Image (cartoon, rainbow, N blue to C red):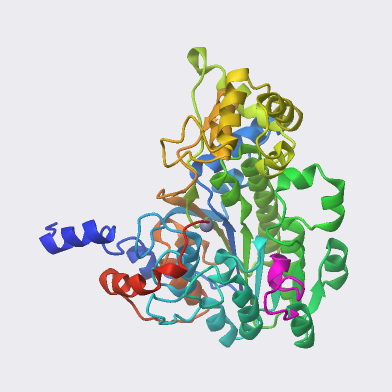
Amino acid sequence: MQISRRALLGAGTTGLLIASQPGATAQKRRFRRKPRNIIFCVADGMSLSTLTMCDQFQQLTEGRHSYWMTLLNAEYATSGLQETRSLNSLVTDSAAASSAWGSGRRQWNGQLNMYPDGTKLRPIMSLMQEAGLRCGLVTTTTITHATPAGFAVNSLTRQQEDVIAQEYLKAGVDVLLGGGDRFFSAQQRKDRRDLYAEYAQAGYRVARTKSELLGAVPANRLLGVFHSGHMPYSVDHNHSPELQSTRPRLREMARAAIACLKSAPRGFFLQIEGGRVDHAAHSNDLAGLIYDQIEFEETIKEVVEFALKDRNTLVIITTDHATGGPALNGSGLAYQDSAAGLQKVAGMKASYDTLLKALGDAPTPDRIRQTVRDLLDIALTPDEAEAVAQATRKNSPFRVSEFYEDTGATLAIVLGNHTKVTWTSQNHTSDHVLITAVGPGNELIAGLHANVDLFSLMLAAKDLKYENPTMDYTTARAHFEKIKHLWAPGG
Ligand SMILES: [Zn+2]
């Protein structure tokens, strides 16, 4: 194929590769049968190596494969790969990635179903609602975070979570479950609006604890907000009786959402996110990563069991991008030490969130060794503890790399000597990611898809078609220059 000079220049300046070739074949395929319901499950920031390590860890500690791995060989499931880039980068953020599914168009990183000039793209939930489906969003992050928001709202920046909390009410999303009290409560919002009262007035049941959630189900409309910010990491939840009695797990929220939506006469559309897989990967926190991945996979197990029984639900299971580039490395004579390294995750009782809080400001190397032994069951050498102590004073020995700047990254580098797991960065990466589907239409998931193709695939499952406006990179960049003060990287 001839590639023009203009196309090459375009590729250089836009970071874009060949125009959306993936998906072209999938678009032409026909559904054998169409589903009534769609459940879209996202393990945010899950690279293939996260999936691999989770499977290997469960084999080592429980003598069984991880659930998602068993799906790869199930005759009722189909898997493929997804390309995840955004409008302005080969490496997407969660807002652009979710909006790609939510609008069928590539977005500028940081924006939700909106181009930098303010052009709004119609989100998939509004189209599904118009077709009579009831809709829900479930996540372990704040419910107003980028991934759930990308299915339902428009925003110039993902960071306006207080506004997104209001927008969900306007959008009429039937079920909302996750964290983010600070964007709903009158005490914590800057404008002092009591969104709980506003939702209740609009007919929502409101749940703030695990028992309130269990007591509210099934409800026609349900708002459940269970933590000030993001929900706690699973590894912390697993070791805290207080969290266990007050905060629902992802699988409990997913179960509640399905109970609320499953009798919808014209079907339902539900998004379920294991959002803290991404956060753990950003922090290079191996225990945070593995236990949240396990919780996500236990959740999709219940979701798939529902779908197999119901026989009328398409379940799509994927991630929006990879994060952190973790990998179990060969180590020791004939690589003999790798498995024992990974197995050390079994002794870890805390996320980095909890560990760094326990360390406090400017801890001594002795205190670091003691805390890491208590919470991670790992004996750091004095040199390793010293490197972490330096990092807490913004003087990490690895600070010359833009990818290993903070305390968590330094801690992860020295823990790698013990776990044999190291990371490529604290950022998202450009890897293609896995996508698996079960239920009517699952056959369409084979092959390589662009993230944007899943929008039209899900609409087609409900006999719908919609084209949002397009914008090229050069035009978008010119507009972005005017609003970039609103934008900050991350998550
Ligand atoms: Zn993400």
Q: Measured from the top left, where is residue 358 in percent x and y? A: 74, 39
Rendered position, 232 above or below 258 = above
- Residue 238 located left or right of residue 135: right
Q: Is residue 4 above or below residue 471?
A: above
Q: Which residues are magenta?
A: 176-194
Residue at the image position 86 percent from the left and 68 percent from the top:
212
* x then y, percent, for residue 390: 56, 31
Residue 294 spot, x, y in % from top left = 67, 45
Residue lying furthest top in this view?
333
Write the residue at 55% across / 42% down: 50
Q: Which quadrant of the figure has residue 151?
A: bottom right
Residue at 68% over, 21% down = 379
**Magenta highlight on residue 48:** no
Vertical side of 425 occupied by 365: above or below: above
Magenta segment, prevailing SS (helix, strand or loop): loop
Is 333 left, or right, of 228 in this rendering? left
Depicted 66 relative to depicted 387: above or below:
below
Q: Does residue 31 appear in the picture of this structure?
A: no
Instruction: Give the quadrant of the N terminus.
Output: bottom left
Q: What residue sits 54% from the left and 47% below the top?
A: 282
